[in-house]
Image (cartoon, coloured by chain):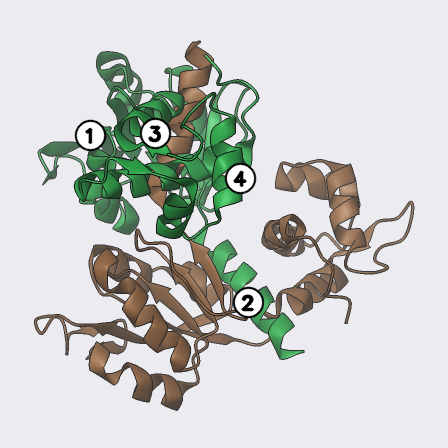
Chain colours: A brown, B green
Amino acid sequence: MERAGIPATTIQRLPLYLRCLLQAEEQRIPLVNSGTLAEMCGTNAAQIRKDLSYLGELGTRGIGYEVRALIEHISAVLGITERRRAVLVGFGRFGGALLGYPGFAERGFDIVAVFDSDPDKIGVSVGGLTVLSVDELEGVLQATGAEIAIMTTPGDVTQELADRLVRAGVRGILNLAPVRLVVPEGVAVRQVCLSTDLQVLSFHLAQNTL
Amino acid sequence: MERAGIPATTIQRLPLYLRCLLQAEEQRIPLVNSGTLAEMCGTNAAQIRKDLSYLGELGTRGIGYEVRALIEHISAVLGITERRRAVLVGFGRFGGALLGYPGFAERGFDIVAVFDSDPDKIGVSVGGLTVLSVDELEGVLQATGAEIAIMTTPGDVTQELADRLVRAGVRGILNLAPVRLVVPEGVAVRQVCLSTDLQVLSFHLAQNTL
């Protein structure tokens, strides 16, 4: 496959293109050119042509891209042609909100287990799942084969839990805890920090005031 | 000020450095060198020296950086020396979770109003605030002078609400809705999309399997 050598910034834009293509398909549009797709995505046509060129020979000059074929191709590159299993670690305020979020399942990610360490939360039923003790982490990961963990744990226990998750086979972590994780090579981490995002916004505000 | 010309990637790392420096200060460490700071941040010393070099002449060769001075300097660059006011638009699952999140206030961002369009939610008291109707958006923004909006609204109404927010003086938007916003120049947007993050993780998983 042509996956190697795709720039990280291109990878980050593929989910956006995919979302726009799925919208086009819903509107029964069979073909799009880079201009139309750019407009749907709020980006520019040259960027789209360049990004898609990394994925191989796609589209026909003067005609455009077949929407269905491009959806399938991008899905294959992103590895989302089959469903992926994820566990949620931390059933606090954010964990609870995430568990009810339909976007994950719609995009092929099934949350198959949820963990917490608080005895008051363990055993609670939520969205067809029962909150499990973190003591059961290893056993459940082995049983479900989940490869992804979404972490919404307090900062001080997050690294230790991440280490256990990785030892038990997790290879991708979406980290919402305010901690920079250290993981072995071969494990991917995406860090989400809303306070950091606000501080970056603040920088732009401060700059405009000058 | 030396704010112009700082690369976007450097700006994105400054909040991390700031967090680590605040930790160092808590531990009563008066001076750090780039190696120590790199270790605390999970990055490398050369990166830190390069990033900080954009902020001007900081630190002393062979000695390091004064923790308090560097905190103040980075805070000034990020424009967070004074508190900033934000409004939350959308009091759903995520909105509710965000409203209880202490990280915003700790980092100098005060949520001064929360809006929704659902009559069942309008009037609800939460964390010292009362959920207001989106009809009151313009009036409240004028009264509070809030410059930042955190949006957790359904996709189909988000752009329209963003337009109203911008017209009413908002210059920074943290967007958690699954929509790419179009805003005029001078308005900064940070897009948070957890499904996209999962798809990027999925790409890494698929790549490792090859």
Query: Which of disc 3 and disc 2 is earlier in sequence?
Result: 3
User: What is the CA distance from the residue labelled 4 to the residue labelled 1?
Assistant: 25 Å
- Report the quarter where the N terminus of chain A lies: bottom right
Asked if badge 4 and badge 1 are on a common chain, one would say yes
Mark 3, residue position: B149
Query: Which of disc 1 and disc 4 is earlier in sequence?
Result: 1
In the image, residue A86 sits, relative to residue B36, either above or below, namely: below
Instruction: Please tell me in which quadrant of the rendered image residue A174 appears.
Output: bottom left
Mark 4, residue position: B180
The chain that hosts pointer 3 is: B
The disc at residue B202 is 2
- Under tag 1, what secondary structure? strand
| Mark 2: amino acid | Ser
User: What is the CA distance from the residue labelled 2 to the residue labelled 3?
Assistant: 31 Å
Residue A188 image point, x, y percent? 50, 65
Asked if badge 1 and badge 3 are on a common chain, one would say yes
| Mark 4: amino acid | Arg
Residue B68 image point, x, y percent? 26, 28
The disc at residue B132 is 1
Left or right of B207 on screen, residue B134: left
